[in-house]
């Protein structure tokens, strides 16, 4: 029989025979796993039945049993905690069972092992251990699931068993545990049932759920007893955070600290700084890996591994042995979060050029002041130019004179030259970038820039120059998320021109009724209180226009009625109400790049039969930045509206209920959803200053292309875009409630 057993089990090992007596130690060395204790049975107290490996029993003389078909009629010796309890001979089919003669002690742990010996006592094999925990009578509730293990099956981050409090990128982690054989286990997530599993004969069970949403999940289980029908207590809880997404990282800009042109340089820009500072955004707490393709070496170089701070920002200064190469340097950035998720950002290109050959012009000039007008207030300490630029002369706490309107069109500070002249400038609109052309700058001259709150957002040094070697330029671009509202020059005098504008023009809505009174009612350029810039044209010459504040509030052009209008941003639709138009009257519309996007005719009318209207909507994919009227005069009102091209019948759109989580409505689920957002939703679920400071309650909407958001308001203003945590949002302000909603770009937005 021993020979047959060895033939069947090729990995059995022979060992010396041991003569055993009660209390003797188990033989050593053993060969575990060939024979097994299949079950331990409790037949005492309230709970009777199988006792799982590691389970509880109040039966101090439990019955052990097993089945080894290859070992009929062999002696099985039973040990507890290595002490011999007794023996039993298996039957002809290899079945055996054993009940100890001496009771075990309560409240103890017993590890059972079984040794099999051939009839000659020459060969031994040992089972794997089987553990039970003894209790007082009826204290052996085995039904509550125990020994829970939650397993991450996805590579990246933590793989394998998860601990309470871990973060995982596996949204279908496997929960397993122990229980009473035959029981039905109900698995719960955050207190709600999500599935069931049956306890196998060995007392084990496992369950893999459907995909879980990102966020906190507390997994637990309860058992339904197959013998008593009772429901157990809730098991221990394993709480983990599911995180399957990491925000896309971004390189926002590099900072050039070398040469004449210093400050922020955006992707595609020029720099003469071989060791710039990189900065950008990402998901707070994520780790970024930055590489650079060098145009000279044709090699991808590892630049840095950096961590994103709690505010979602990061920066890296090139070290001593790192340099840009001449030409286009292409930066690549990727992010990995604690859970092991990976996201790749857009490449950033910086072109290294020769010293001082790195001028980066403002793409869209919204305001330009050449200081060429004569003012009656010549020599005053404060002026407001025709473009709305406010200029004040400062020296320390003293206000000095400014000379405005010299023959060469420059701004002079009335200082005696012994001290650095200090001048403040307040823009008529907060802008992304400012360029200052100047003629003279003393050593150490600089320009300090401020946002709308008066906070310093940056500084640019001015190249020292003299009258003989004048005509230098300072350009500064606001950091990500900021705008320039004002600036102060120190040691720069005279200044030839100041211009300001946007890298990305905001979407705006507004109107102008031309009802203001101006001291100068015959200027060729005016900026209205709505921000509309109006310029009189006649061919290539600028002609006068009259901006009246009379009772009918109209704009009059005093020459051949060719007038240019520049909006304070870009819009989708422009409407012009006018009183008189010539037979060939037209309006031509332009985008932000100055390209014509359409022309419409104006209906001929005269003073007697006035009050006609021209309306133009931008073609798909375009926005209106400016327009020129030909042969229309006077004009009564002009209105411009953003978002009007979204003309779908929003009442017919299928809707879903938005789910809010930490001031964010999540639509990114792979399905095309439509949700309606109200002011009450923002006030209830939003957070003050969630992504930028304006004192308003703000709600963010994350979604995919194909998702739709309907903002339930007829008074919505679009404020452009901002990037936070690597995600770019379009910003909408509900004027009626002073609340904001930020919608991820790619999501369709309707309002009304």
Image: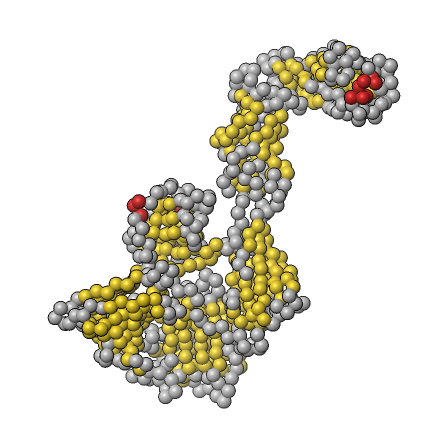
> Is 642 situated left or right of 92 in this image?
left
In the rendered image, the vertical position of residue 41 relative to residue 159, given as above or below: above
Which of the 4 quarters of the picture holds residue 571?
bottom left
Tell me where residue 722 appears, x and y as whole percent.
44, 58
Tell me where residue 352 appears, x and y as whole percent.
58, 72
| Color scheme of the displayed model | secondary structure
Tell me where residue 714 appears, x and y as whole percent.
28, 53
Quadrant of the drawing holding the N terminus? top right
Q: Which residue lies furthest to the left in this view?
A: 608
In the rendered image, the vertical position of residue 398 relative to residue 138, given as above or below: below
> Is 288 situated left or right of 16 in this image?
left
- Counting every numbered tag in the picture gives 0
Which of the 4 quarters of the picture holds residue 150?
top right
The answer to whether any part of residue 313 appears in the image is: no
Closer to us: 220 or 93: 93
Residue at 63% in and 41% down: 159
Closer to us: 268 or 112: 268
In the rendered image, the vertical position of residue 705 relative to residue 128, given as above or below: below
Which of the 4 quarters of the picture holds residue 606?
bottom left
Residue at 57% in and 61% down: 315
Residue at 65% in and 22% down: 202
Residue at 61% in and 64% down: 293
In the rendered image, the vertical position of residue 659 relative to residue 196, given as above or below: below
Tell me where residue 238 appears, x and y as whole percent.
57, 34
> Is 663 situated left or right of 287 in this image?
left
The answer to whether any part of residue 597 appears in the image is: yes
């Amino acid at each position: 029989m021993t020979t047959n057993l060895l033939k069947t089990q090729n990995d059995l090992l022979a060992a010396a025979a041991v003569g055993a007596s009660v209390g003797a130690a188990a033989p050593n060395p053993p060969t575990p796993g060939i024979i097994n204790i299949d079950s331990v049975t409790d037949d005492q107290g309230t709970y009777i039945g199988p006792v799982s490996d590691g389970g509880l029993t109040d039966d101090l003389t439990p019955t052990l049993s097993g089945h080894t078909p290859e070992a009929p009629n062999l002696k099985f010796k039973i040990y507890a905690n290595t002490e011999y309890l007794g023996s039993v001979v298996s039957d002809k089919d290899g079945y055996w069972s054993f009940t100890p003669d001496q009771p075990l002690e309560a409240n103890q742990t017993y590890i059972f092992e079984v040794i099999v010996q051939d009839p000659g006592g020459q060969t031994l094999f040992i089972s794997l251990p089987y553990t039970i925990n003894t209790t007082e009578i009826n204290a052996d509730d085995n039904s509550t699931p125990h020994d829970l293990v939650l397993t991450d099956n996805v590579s990246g981050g933590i793989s394998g068993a998860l601990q309470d409090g871990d973060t995982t990128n596996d949204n279908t982690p496997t929960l397993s545990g122990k229980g009473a054989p035959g029981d039905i286990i109900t698995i719960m997530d955050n207190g709600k049932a999500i599935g069931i599993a049956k306890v196998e004969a060995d007392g084990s069970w496992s369950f893999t759920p459907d995909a879980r949403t990102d966020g906190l999940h507390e997994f637990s289980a309860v058992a339904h007893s197959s013998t008593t029908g009772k429901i157990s207590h809730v098991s221990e809880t394993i709480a983990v955070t599911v995180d399957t997404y990491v925000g896309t990282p971004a390189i926002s800009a590099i900072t050039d600290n070398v040469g004449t042109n210093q400050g922020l340089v955006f992707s595609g820009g020029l720099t003469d700084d071989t060791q710039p500072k990189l900065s950008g955004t990402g998901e707070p707490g994520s780790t970024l890996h930055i590489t650079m393709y060098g145009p000279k070496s044709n090699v991808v170089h590892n630049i840095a591994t950096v961590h994103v701070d709690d505010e979602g920002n990061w920066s890296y200064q090139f070290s001593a042995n790192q340099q840009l190469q001449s030409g286009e340097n292409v930066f690549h950035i990727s992010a990995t979060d604690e859970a092991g998720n990976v996201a790749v950002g857009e490449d950033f290109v910086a072109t290294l050029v020769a010293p001082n050959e790195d001028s980066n012009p403002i793409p869209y000039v919204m305001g330009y002041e050449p200081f060429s007008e004569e003012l009656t207030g010549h020599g005053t300490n404060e002026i407001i130019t025709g473009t709305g630029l406010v200029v004040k002369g400062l020296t320390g706490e003293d206000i000095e004179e400014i000379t405005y309107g010299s023959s060469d069109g420059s701004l002079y500070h009335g200082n005696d030259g012994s001290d650095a002249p200090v001048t403040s400038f307040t823009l008529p609109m907060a802008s992304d970038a400012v360029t200052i052309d100047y003629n003279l700058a003393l050593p150490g001259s600089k320009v300090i820039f401020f946002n709308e709150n008066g906070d310093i957002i940056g500084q640019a040094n001015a190249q020292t120059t003299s009258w003989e070697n004048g005509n230098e330029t300072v350009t500064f671009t606001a950091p990500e998320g900021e705008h320039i509202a004002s600036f102060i020059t120190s040691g720069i005098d005279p200044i030839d021109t100041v211009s300001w504008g946007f890298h990305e023009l905001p979407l705006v809505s507004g109107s102008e009724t031309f009802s203001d009174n101006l001291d100068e009612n015959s200027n060729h350029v005016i900026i209205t209180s709505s921000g509309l810039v109006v310029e009189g044209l006649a061919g290539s010459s600028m002609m006068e226009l009259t901006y009246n504040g009379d009772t009918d509030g109209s704009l009059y052009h005093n020459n051949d009625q060719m007038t240019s209008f520049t909006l304070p941003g870009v819009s989708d639709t422009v409407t012009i109400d006018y009183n008189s138009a010539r037979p060939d009257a037209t309006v031509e519309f332009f985008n932000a790049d100055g390209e014509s996007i359409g022309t419409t005719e104006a209906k001929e009318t005269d003073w007697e039969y006035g009050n006609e209207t021209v309306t133009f909507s931008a073609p798909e994919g375009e926005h209106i930045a400016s327009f020129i009227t030909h042969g229309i005069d006077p004009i009564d009102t002009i209105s411009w509206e953003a978002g009007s091209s979204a003309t779908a019948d929003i009442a017919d759109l299928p809707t879903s209920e938005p789910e809010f989580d930490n001031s964010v409505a999540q639509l990114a689920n792979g399905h095309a959803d439509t949700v309606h957002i109200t002011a009450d939703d923002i006030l209830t679920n939003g957070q003050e200053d969630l992504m930028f400071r304006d004192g308003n309650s703000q709600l963010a909407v994350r979604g995919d292309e194909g998702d739709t958001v309907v903002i339930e308001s007829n008074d919505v203003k679009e404020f452009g875009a901002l990037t936070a945590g690597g995600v770019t949002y379009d910003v909408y302000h509900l004027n009626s409630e002073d609340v904001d909603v930020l919608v991820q770009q790619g999501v369709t937005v309707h309002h009304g």
